[in-house]
Amino acid sequence: MLLFRAYYSKYIAGKQSRCYIWIILIRKEEIFFGESSVQSLKLGDVVLHSPLWNAGGTCKSKKDIDLLVKTRVGAIEYGSITAEPRDGNPGTVIHVNDDGNSLNSIGLKNEGVAYYMERLPWLVEIARGYGKPFFLNIAGSNPSDFIVLASLALAAKVDAMVVNLSCPNAHDANALLCFQLDTVGMVLNAVRRGSENKIPLIPKISPITDPSYRATLVRFLASFPEVAAIASCNTFPGCWDCDDEGKSYISGTGYAGGAGDQLFQFNLGQVRSICHLLNQEGRGRDIPVIGIGGVTDGRRAHQYIRAGARFVAMHTAARNPQPPYQLLPDAFDRVSDELSAIILTN
Ligand SMILES: Cc1cc2nc3c(=O)[nH]c(=O)nc-3n(C[C@H](O)[C@H](O)[C@H](O)COP(=O)(O)O)c2cc1C
């Protein structure tokens, strides 16, 4: 694949703004498993100007959107949000260590659908004003939540919905949704119903260590016509770490979703295997895979593209590693620039 990045700068409201346009041609080394996994930066009918964006959990307010729209992310992913407001889990719920690993047990803190009903169309418009498609990340524990959330997404005219089937930190939920095929089916049908089949869906899955179940799940997801991409992956459930006195970094049970560096090689393999499975199903062209986990620089983002992903998203490396772990939007521009430099020299 040859990916050209055209660059121009212009002045908007007195501020210099830079804009990159990604143009992709297919070259031989990007032909995986006999099928091209990369054709363009298209996700459903949505065209992105960059293959990189912010992963779930990085953008949960207007303030976050204001920071991200000024970066070169290809889309804005907002959420996760749930049907009812959630306070999240109490105490210390994030820890990032010096090795680039993160633990979090935020527990889907958000304001709930009633709050977003008025605000979401406005937030979508802000993102669009900067040429960024808006993806809404939705989470829930039962199909009726997802109907409500999908109706909200439809009313706000979002560009796609990331269906979070893999949050390990909602301790009131029975189990991770993506590990129960019948629940996945009920959730996706609920989302289709709520959105009147009009919004592309991006199911987001967990790290799945059983290759046989992973294959079953991917084939099942690919059988839904609205599935426009698969996001791999969410945090690794049940991680734990402590300080030198043996005290858990995370409050409550201490268990948390692990991400960052520790996910990288596992998820490269998971992404590669998902692309392989989709190609076997003849769906590799129309269901791109989004590689998420341990992206810290352009080289790692490019490793995901080598593994077959068409898009890449990141979270941990875009947070300050010191409390209060605030969002570092410049990280997206750095990785984006490094990625384009690698692609242009390959
Ligand atoms: C603090 C934190 C909060 C997160 N919140 C969400 C969330 O609300 N929804 C979601 O789908 N994923 C969430 N994630 C998972 C990330 O989107 C991503 O899948 C995972 O962290 C792997 O990427 P990374 O290694 O770049 O962090 C969260 C991750 C972290 C570290």
Image: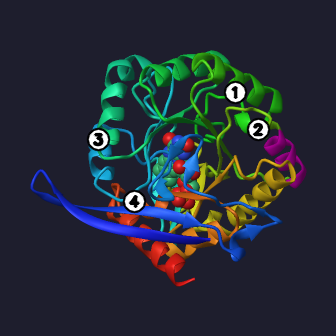
The answer to whether residue 104 of the structure is visible from this angle is no
What element does badge 3 sit on?
helix
In terms of sequence position, does the residue under pointer 1 or pointer 4 come before the other?
1
Front of the two marks 1 and 4? 1
In terms of sequence position, does the residue under pointer 4 or pointer 3 come before the other?
3
The numbered dot on residue 221 is 2
In terms of sequence position, does the residue under pointer 2 or pointer 3 come before the other?
3
Furthest residue toward left: 14
Which residue is depicted at the point 77% across and 54% down? 274
The residues colored magenta run 211-219
Marks 4/3: CA–CA distance: 25 Å
What element does badge 1 sit on?
helix
Furthest residue toward front: 25
In terms of sequence position, does the residue under pointer 4 or pointer 2 come before the other?
2
282, above or below 187, in the image: below
Identity, as a three-letter code, of the amino acid under mark 3: Gly
Identity, as a three-letter code, of the amino acid under mark 4: Arg
Neighbour tally class for label 1: few under 14, some 14-19, many 20 plus, Cα within 10 Å: many
Prevailing secondary structure class for the magenta stretch in the rendered image: helix
Per the image, the residue denoted by label 1 is: 188
Residue 123 horizontal side relative to residue 285, left or right? left
Give percent across and percent down for residue 55: 50, 50
The numbered dot on residue 129 is 3
Marks 2/3: CA–CA distance: 32 Å
Q: Is mark 4 within 8 Å of ligand 1?
A: yes
In this view of the protein, which residue sits in the foreground, 20 or 321?
20
Neighbour tally class for label 3: few under 14, some 14-19, many 20 plus, Cα within 10 Å: few
Q: Are marks 2 and 1 in contact (CB under 8 Å)?
A: yes
Q: Please state, as top left, top right, bottom left or bottom right, where the N terminus lies in the image.
A: bottom right
